[in-house]
Image (cartoon, coloured by chain):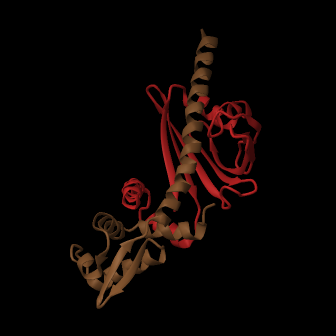
Chain colours: A brown, B red
Amino acid sequence: MVNYSGLNRTFAALVDPTRRAILARLEREGATSISALAQPFAIKLPAVMKHLDVLGGAGLIARSKVGRTVTVELRPEPMREAMDWLRRYERFWSKSLDRLAVYAESQETEARKRKL
Amino acid sequence: MTSLTLVRRIKARPSIVFDALTSPEGIACWWGPDEGPVLVAETDPRVGGHFRVRFRMVDGSEHESTGEYLAVVKPERLSMSWRWTGGVEDPGASLVEIRLRPVSEGTELTLTHARLHDEETCRSHKDGWTGALDKLERHFLATQEYTA
C-alpha cells in the first residue's frame, strides 16, 4: 500500500537537479558532512541547507551531529516506494500495450484481406 | 507529479489502434498486466462518457478500473481519468493520455499515465519533472545496491 502524501513529497524533492546531485553524492560517498557536501555546488551554504530541509522533509536523508559536525546520510526507502508505484503501472501498461499491438496488428491484417 | 510514459510502434493504422483502445471487443483482448481474462469491458468513447473494465489476474485476484473520457479525437488522441474501483491499489485519481501518430510502418503510440497530485507537485511538474524520471531510475538502482 502506497502512502500518497509521502509519495508527493518524494517526487517534489526529486524534481530539483541540485537535490538529485546531493542524493547521488550521498549514494556514492555515504554519510557526508554538510560543509563537505556544499563544496562542489556553486551555491551558498544556506541554499544547500534549504535543499537539505526539503530532502529531510521527504524522508530522503537523515542528519546526525557529532560534536560540531553535522553529517547527512541517504534514506532510500521513500524513493523505493515511489519506484514501486511507477513499476506497478509500468507493468500494467507494458503488458497491456504488448497485447494491444498484437490485437491491432491482427485487425490490420484482417482489414487488408477484406480490401483485396 | 508521478508519471509514466511508454512508447510503442504498432504495425496497424492509427484508426485501427484507436478502435482497439476504445472498443469493448478490443479491450477484452489486451487489457491487464498478465494473461488473465477481461471480465467486463464497457466503453462510451465520447467526451463525458465513461469506461469500466474488470479483469482477473492469473493469481485469481480481480481488479476493476473506471474513468471518464476527457478527450476523444479519433484517430489521434484519447484522454481519460482513471480510478481503481475500491481504491485498494491506488486510492487517488489519475490521468491517462494516449497519442497516436501515423508513421511509415503504422502507428506510434505514446501513453502517459500520470497521478494528479496536490498543487506543490503540479508546480514541480511544470519545473520539469518529466525529464527526471530516467535519473530517478538510475538513483533507485544505485540505491538498491547501496542498501544491499
The image shows a total of numbered marks equal to: 0
Please give the name of the residue rendered at 39% of the width and 80% of the height, measured from the top-left corner.
A63
Please give the name of the residue rendered at 35% of the width and 77% of the height, measured from the top-left corner.
A72
Image height of B68 relative to B125, above or below: above
Which of the 4 quarters of the picture holds residue A105? Answer: top right
Q: Position of residue B99 (x, y in %)?
A: 53, 42
Q: Position of residue A30 (x, y in %)?
A: 31, 69
Q: Position of residue B105 (x, y in %)?
A: 45, 25
Q: Position of residue B20 (x, y in %)?
A: 64, 32
Which of the 4 quarters of the picture holds residue B32? Answer: top right
Which residue is the extreme one toward the top?
A116
Please give the name of the residue rendered at 62% of the width and 22% of the height, measured from the top-left corner.
A107
Image height of B59 relative to B91, above or below: above
Which of the 4 quarters of the picture holds residue A106? Answer: top right
Is B21 on the left or on the right of B54, as rendered? left
Q: Which quarter of the rendering shows the C terminus of chain A? A: top right
| B94, A79: nearer the viewer | A79
Please give the name of the residue rendered at 41% of the width and 77% of the height, measured from the top-left corner.
A62
Which residue is the extreme one toward the bottom?
A68
Is A30 on the left or on the right of B90, as rendered? left
Q: Which quarter of the rendering shows the N terminus of chain A? A: bottom right
